[in-house]
Image: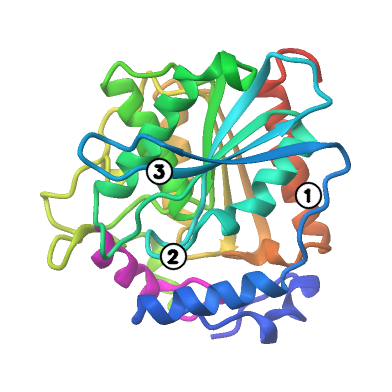
Amino acid sequence: MSYPIDPELATWIPMVPEVDFADPAAIRARMREMADVIPAYQPVNPVEVRALSIPGPAGAPEVDIRVYTPTAEPGPLGALVHIHGGGFVIGDLDMAERTALRVADEVGVVVVAMDYRLAPEHPFPAGLEDCYATLEWTVKHAAELGVDPDRIAVGGDSAGGGLTAAVALLARDRGGPALAYQVLNIPELDDRLSTPSMTAFTDTPMWHRPNAILSWDFYLGDGKRGTAEVSPYAAPARATDLSGLPPAFVAVCEFDPLRDEGLDYAQRLVQAGVSTELHLYPGTFHGSSFVAGAAVTLRMGRDLTDALRRALRGGRG
C-alpha cells in the first residue's frame, strides 16, 4: 500500500530497517547494528552521565540505570524517568541514550533511564515493575540526585509510552509517588488491536499490525492478547478510570498503527479532567524521527522539550 509520507521522510524509507519481531534475538542484534550507525547526540551544555545498579522489585534482579545530570544548571532540578521503546521486546540503555542526553541538555533536567527486563523471556509484569521500582528509587534519592521531588515526570516512546501510562496508573492506585507529568510519545496502549489505524496499517514502515500482534503475544504470553484477563496495567487503554492521573503530553504519527489508540487515550484523559497536550504529526510514521534533520522531526522535538520545560522547570523557562 502507498502512503503520502512527508517528502523529507519519504526519501529515507528505502534505508528504514526491516523490523521483524518473529525472531527476538535476531531483531535485537539488527537494532544494535543500527544503533552503531546513528549519529550520537552531542550536548551543547555539560551533562554528567553515571551508570548505576539499583534494587529491583522484590525478589527480582537489580535494575541497571543511567543518570544524566546537566551540571551547569542550578538545583534542585526537575527530573524525567525515561522508558525506552522497542515493542516490549527490544531496546536497552544505549537505545535510550540519545533522548536522555537531549532532554538533559535542552530541558535542563535530570534524566534517569533504566534497562528493564524484556519479553518474551520476562513477560508482564516484569518490565513494568522494573520501571516502577526505578521511579520509586528516583523519588527516594531525589536529594542526592539534586532533584525536586515535586517535579518528577515519567515518559517514554512506543512501548515505553505504554509503560509510562501504566506506571502513572500504578502510582495513582498504589498511593505511590505524585507525578508532575507523563509523556506518552507514540504510545503502545491496547492489546485488542481493533482501532481503524491498527486494522488498516499492515505494511507501514518500522511498525505495522503483524509486529504489533507479536509484540503483545510476547509481552502477555500466548493466548492472552484480546482476552478479558488482560490487566489495564499491561494495556492501559483498558483502564476504565483515568481520573487523578498527572498532566500528559501525547504525540502520535499519522501513518502509525498506534495512532488511534493514542488519540483515544488522550481524549479520555481530557474527559477525565486530566490536562492533556495532544499532537498528531501529518506525513509521519512510527519511528520516523530517526530522520533527525527533517522539519517535522525538528518540530516534534521542539514540542516535547517545550512541554517538559513548562512542566518541570518550575517557572525558570
Q: Nearer the viewer, residue 132 or 66?
A: 66
Q: Under tag 2, what secondary structure?
A: loop
The amino acid marked with disc number 2 is: Ile
Residue found 58% across the figure and 18% down from its top: 144
Q: Give the quadrant of the C terminus.
A: top right
Q: Which residue is mark 1?
A: 299
Q: Is residue 21 visible?
A: no
Residue at the right extreme of this rendering: 44
Q: CA distance from mark 2 to mark 3?
A: 16 Å
Q: Which mark is residue 63?
A: 3
Q: Under tag 3, what secondary structure?
A: strand
Residue 116 drawn above or below residue 220: above
Q: Which residue is mark 2?
A: 90
Which comes before the other along the chain, label 1 or label 3?
A: 3
Name the dominant secondary structure of the magenta segment. helix
Q: Quadrant of residue 66?
A: top right
